[in-house]
Amino acid sequence: MLKKVTAVMNTAFMFALGVGFLLLIIILLMLFSPLILMFCLIGYFQEREFEKRFLIFLAEIEGENLFWYNNRRKGKDFIEVNILPKLDASVKIVYLDGNDIHSIYDRAMIQRCSAHFSNYSRFPHLLKVRNGQLLDESINNQFFNVVNQKKDKDNLLKTIHQFFEMTES
């Protein structure tokens, strides 16, 4: 009999503890919901403002061609010796050294551009701005075929030049 009473009390205590915890969560949500709502609204308006600035940025760089590469040692050395000197002078370079971005453009804008990449982790990468749109292509596979398998680098250069010359993808 004592065991039954203890079990019932235990169950009642656990139920009361659960209800108390649930009430505490509801009270905290009610107290902090204005703050949560405020932060969500601030974030929303900041993102809207940034998107407006980004669209202005895209209009400013309309027609630009950007060649992106990173600090992967084998690729970096090959690019700087064999690719960059052969690019048209109008092609802008974006070099990613870990988390550091080396570019003539605003860091936040370049980061937003990279968010539009269809295959971000595959460098080197080509990007062009046409009609307010970002068009991109990773040349990673072709590039490392040239570097590792000693394939003809002229085909890679041709691919790069063709990508930048095309007005639509």
Image (cartoon, rainbow, N blue to C red):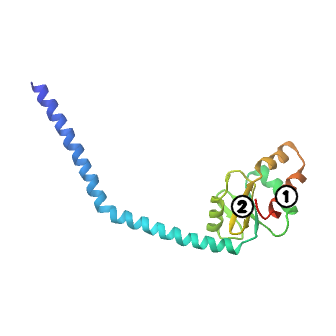
Q: Is residue 74 left or right of residue 52?
A: right
The image quarter containing residue 115 is bottom right
Image location of residue 105, percent across then percent down: 69, 70
Q: Label 2 to label 1, Cα distance in Å?
A: 20 Å
Question: Is 154 located above or below residue 134 in the figure?
Answer: above
Tell me if mark 2 has few (under 14), some (14-19) or many (20+) residues whose alpha carbon lies within 10 angstroms of its own. Answer: many
The image quarter containing residue 113 is bottom right
Q: Residue furthest top?
A: 1
Q: Nearer the viewer, residue 103 or 129?
A: 129
Image depth: mark 2 or mark 1 in front: 2
Residue at the spot of label 1: 83
Q: Residue at x 57, y 69 (%)?
A: 51
Q: Quadrant of the N terminus?
A: top left
Image location of residue 35, percent across then percent down: 36, 65
Q: Is residue 53 left or right of residue 16?
A: right
Tell me, for residue 38, which label it has, or none. Answer: none
Q: Residue at x 88, y 45 (%)?
A: 151
Residue at the spot of label 2: 135
The amino acid marked with disc number 2 is Leu
Say whether disc 2 or disc 1 marks the residue closer to the N-terminus.
1
Tell me if mark 1 has few (under 14), some (14-19) or many (20+) residues whose alpha carbon lies within 10 angstroms of its own. Answer: some
User: What secondary structure is found at the residue carrying circle 1?
Assistant: helix
Q: Is residue 3 left or right of residue 17?
A: left
Q: Nearer the viewer, residue 57 or 165?
A: 165
